């Protein structure tokens, strides 16, 4: 009687354990099973106690433990649909005799299911990793904190960064230029597509696509796919160069060569496109150096006459007599020195194509009437001939003069003006479209690098400030001049044009002279040296850096030129 309360207390304790417990006697009969064992096995203690364990749990090994006296630790066992992990111990008396056995076990069915699921997940992960590893596109995966957790070999190849320099590091570690799209996606939860940036120490040009990773409705990371486009860009540049070369052989300029994005320039280009689709005469108006000839070429190349001749005539470059014979041709014996058999004029040469009459305001009045006949009747008469020759020529004229003013002075025919002014296009000066200066600078430096054999990367911010402040009386042509002289002033190792490379920027020639003396009286020797340096720079500019030709133009020996260039720091 005295021991009964103690046994009940022990049973109460065992009933509250999370582990199942079954005790058998020396004959393998069940003596006790706690509540947890009842739930796990589904056994009713009233029907189980006193029964042999092998009868109620066929795969039990408690009988073996009783017979061998050896414990069995961490054994997996299936009981119906339940999986348990069990430890079996023999129970011995004070003499060491085995008097029973106890099984202490735990239900691991859910753990088994989780284990199988984890195994499946690991197999899926291994498969995904194999796919990621073999992908030609660079892939990077970041966690929700913006830390790199996965990168593939293509990523390390494109960025030039080894895995150890990236894994466990912030996603910004690979960015050379631009902002992290991983961070943006993690902050917004929205994917981004086709973002251009530069990555790695080599600043490779890439296009990035990044998408968020959602798990149970929460963002847990992001995955990025990086496409290397540096080779595509290189090939595109090579193709562009090839096209430019081919275009140069066929015709010199198109609208692509007219650089700028200002509204006024875009309007002029749109007008040129419209004009090109018709056969009308075009009058290009604008200051010297604004690019009127480029527009004339572009209109021709966009027109149906693109396969015909494009002939440029500068009406101010020849005497009246020579200009007449060049434009209209002449018959044999028309004048002393006339070629035997006569000669075709430029209008005949341009038949089926375009003739560009530059500086049309300088055309002599006598030739203005002949030009008017060509425009009216589509016929030319050679000098010394009375027979008209039919021509099909599109006329593009250009001038920087005020033709209305010339008409009032009697220097230009009004009827010719109205024939020419069918489709006028005004090209505004550079000072009114200074927003185009950066694009023009980039384009001009690219061409000058090819001409001079240099590798100039660009200009400094200070230089841009100077260029934006300047009035540009010479327009784009003057900008080309200034940049060309600046490059000549640069040392071979210098890559960026600085303000000290620029020549004096003067609105008028007298201003440049004034700058030499401005501020103080200079010694005569210093004035001479400044003049000498300016003369050498001008000669080098005119000869495109050819020192032998520059020396000849200056009347110096080549050796003396090198000496003076070294003296004045001209490279």
Image: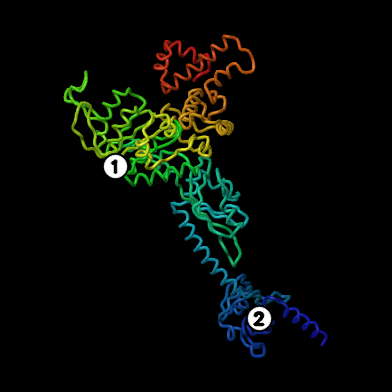
Nearer the observer: mark 1 or 2; the answer is: 1
Q: Residue 37: which numbered mark, if any?
A: 2
Q: Quadrant of residue 186?
A: bottom right
Q: Is residue 241 visible?
A: no
Q: Nearer the viewer, residue 320 or 218?
A: 320
- State how far apart marks 1 and 2 are (Cα): 99 Å
Residues packed near mark 2 inside 10 Å, few (<14), some (14 to 19) or many (20 plus): many
The residue shown at (44%, 42%) is 268
Left or right: residue 18 compared with residue 160: right
- How many numbered discs sit on the rendered protein? 2
Answer above or below: position of 110 versus 27. above
Helix or strand or loop: what does disc 1 sit on?
Answer: loop
Left or right: residue 1 compared with residue 279: right
- Residue linked to disc 1: 305
Q: In which quarter of the image is residue 11?
A: bottom right
Q: Which of 341 and 201 is in front in this view?
A: 341
């Amino acid at each position: 009687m005295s021991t009964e309360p103690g046994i009940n207390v022990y049973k109460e304790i065992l009933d509250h354990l999370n582990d199942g417990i079954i005790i058998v006697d020396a004959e393998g009969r069940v003596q006790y099973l706690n509540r947890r064992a009842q739930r796990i096995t589904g056994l009713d203690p009233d029907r189980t106690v006193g029964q042999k364990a092998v009868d109620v749990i066929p795969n039990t090994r408690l009988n073996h433990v009783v017979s061998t006296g050896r414990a069995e630790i961490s054994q997996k066992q299936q009981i119906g649909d339940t999986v348990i992990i069990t430890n079996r111990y023999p129970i011995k008396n004070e003499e060491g005799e085995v008097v029973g056995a106890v099984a202490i076990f735990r239900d691991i069915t859910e753990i088994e299911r989780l284990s199988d699921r984890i195994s499946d997940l690991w197999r899926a992960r291994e498969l995904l990793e194999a796919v990621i590893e073999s992908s030609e596109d660079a892939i990077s995966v970041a966690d929700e904190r913006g830390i790199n957790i996965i990168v593939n070999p293509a990523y390390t190849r494109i960025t030039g960064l080894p895995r150890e320099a990236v894994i466990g590091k912030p996603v910004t570690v690979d960015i050379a230029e631009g902002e992290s799209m991983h961070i943006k996606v993690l902050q917004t939860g929205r994917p981004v597509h086709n973002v251009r940036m530069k990555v790695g120490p080599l600043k490779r040009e890439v296009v990035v696509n990044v998408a968020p990773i959602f798990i149970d409705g929460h963002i847990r990371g992001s995955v990025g796919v990086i496409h290397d486009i540096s080779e595509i860009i290189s090939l595109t540049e090579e193709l562009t160069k090839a096209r430019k070369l081919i275009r140069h052989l066929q015709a010199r300029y198109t609208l692509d060569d007219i650089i700028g994005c200002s509204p006024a320039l875009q309007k002029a280009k749109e007008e040129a496109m419209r004009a090109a689709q018709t056969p009308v005469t075009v009058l290009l108006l604008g200051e010297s150096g604004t690019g009127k000839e480029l527009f004339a070429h572009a209109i021709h190349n966009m027109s149906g006459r693109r396969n015909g001749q494009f002939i440029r005539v500068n009406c101010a470059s020849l005497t009246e007599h020579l200009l007449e014979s060049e434009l209209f041709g002449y018959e044999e014996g028309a004048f002393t020195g006339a070629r035997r058999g006569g000669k075709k004029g430029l209008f005949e040469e341009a038949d089926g194509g375009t003739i560009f009459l530059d500086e049309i305001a300088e055309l002599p009045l006598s030739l203005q009437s002949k030009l008017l006949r060509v425009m009216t009747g589509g016929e030319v008469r050679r000098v010394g001939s009375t027979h008209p020759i039919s021509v099909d020529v599109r006329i593009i004229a250009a001038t920087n003069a005020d033709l209305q003013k010339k008409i009032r002075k009697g220097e230009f025919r009004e009827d010719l003006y109205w024939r020419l002014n069918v489709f006028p296009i005004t090209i505004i000066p550079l000072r009114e479209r200074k927003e185009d200066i950066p694009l023009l600078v980039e384009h001009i430096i690219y061409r000058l690098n090819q001409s001079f054999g240099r590798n100039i990367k660009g200009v400094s911010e200070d230089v841009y400030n100077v260029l934006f402040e300047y009035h540009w009386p010479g327009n784009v042509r003057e900008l080309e001049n200034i940049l060309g002289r600046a490059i000549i002033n640069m040392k071979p190792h210098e890559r960026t044009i600085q303000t000290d490379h620029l020549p004096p920027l003067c609105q008028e020639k007298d201003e440049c002279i004034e700058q030499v003396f401005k501020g103080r009286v200079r010694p005569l020797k210093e004035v001479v040296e400044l003049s000498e340096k300016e003369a050498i720079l001008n000669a080098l500019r005119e000869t495109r850096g050819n020192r032998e030709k520059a020396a000849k133009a200056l009347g110096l020996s080549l050796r003396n030129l090198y000496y003076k260039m070294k003296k004045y720091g001209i490279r």
